[in-house]
Amino acid sequence: MRVFVTRPEAEARRWVEDLRRRGFDAVAFPLIAILAVIDDAPLRAAWQRLAAYRAAMFVSGNAVRHFFGHAPEGSRWPDGTRAWATGAGTQGALIAAGVDGACIDAPPVSSAQFDSESLWTQVEREVRGGDRVLIVRGGDAQGSASGRDWLAQQVTAAGGLVDTVVSYRRAAPQLDARQLADARDGQAVWLFSSSEAIANLEAVLPGHAWHAARAVATHPRIAQAARRAGFSVVCESRPGLDSVIGVLESFR
């Protein structure tokens, strides 16, 4: 079974290796390009005031890696600042960056979903009036902050103060002729971990009919986006490897 892994390139490669070891013809098909920020001054400033925050929330592993890529030489994570992660991948990136696991809050591995809502159930009691929270997120190709504001709204409603910093940019991929031809393969299964990836796929192949293609989506919102795009067979999965493989096996 051919499986197109649509995560950004570095993450897609890891998933391809794991899926191939489990017997799938996995192919990296990144539908989001990850770029450095145009101006890193806000990132350097965020590091200078990091100790003033009650917590810093990271939306993804890419947010972690690019934020820590701008850490001043010799700096370390401040003892009084919590690190919030939306899921295991982000949590692992924080630990790899040197953050003590005891400083990290994340949804438990048994969570039905790994998202801002699941994270908030773990941290909402930590936020008190006047607490400052930094949200480290991605931006669009021009560098403007983009993505959901749900968690920022919850912090504000709890009396906290929210700052946002963009640590990386997301852009549409540049696909070659071979990749465009492969994308029309109606027998492949698409593995989606982002609604933005689906939008980019629609943009590079405008008007293509996806009703014969199958998709696995790692969140209900992503599944909805796949159905809106025209995928008639869309299965939801928890984002872990074993869960995804279980769903892929159902297609055999």
Image (cartoon, helix red, strand yellow):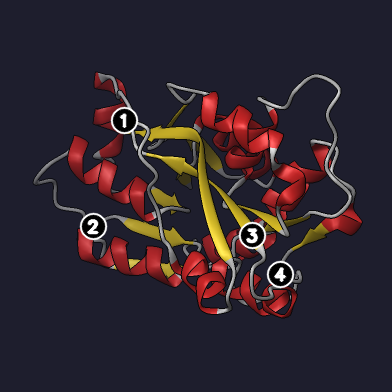
Tell which tag, 1 or 3, sits nearer the viewer: 3
SS under mark 2: loop
Crowding at dot 1, Cα within 10 Å, few <14 / some 14-19 / many 20+, comes out as few
Between the residue at mark 2 and the residue at mark 1, the CA separation in whole angstroms equals: 35 Å
Return the residue nearer the eye: 94 or 73. Answer: 73
206 is higher (above) or lower (below) than 9: below
In the image: residue 167, left or right of residue 228 = right
Question: Label 2: which residue?
Answer: 212
Question: Label 3: which residue?
Answer: 132
Q: Amino acid at mark 3?
A: Arg
Between the residue at mark 4 and the residue at mark 3, the CA separation in whole angstroms equals: 21 Å
- The answer to whether residue 15 of the structure is visible from this angle is no
Locate residue 118, reporting x and y percent. Answer: 62, 74
220 is higher (above) or lower (below) than 145: below
Return the residue nearer the eye: 174 or 146. Answer: 146
Tell which tag, 2 or 4, sits nearer the viewer: 4
Q: Amino acid at mark 4?
A: Pro
Locate residue 249, reporting x and y percent. Answer: 56, 62
Q: Earlier in the sequence, mark 2 or mark 4?
A: 4
Between the residue at mark 1 and the residue at mark 3, the CA separation in whole angstroms equals: 27 Å
Q: Earlier in the sequence, mark 2 or mark 1?
A: 1
Residue 107: assigned label: 4
SS under mark 3: strand
Locate residue 117, reporting x and y percent. Answer: 56, 74
Question: Label 1: which residue?
Answer: 142
Q: Earlier in the sequence, mark 3 or mark 2?
A: 3
Q: Amino acid at mark 2?
A: Ala
Between the residue at mark 3 and the residue at mark 2, the CA separation in whole angstroms equals: 48 Å
Q: Amino acid at mark 1?
A: Gln
Tell which tag, 2 or 1, sits nearer the viewer: 1
Residue at x 62% of width, y 77% of height: 112
In the image: residue 146, left or right of residue 95 = left
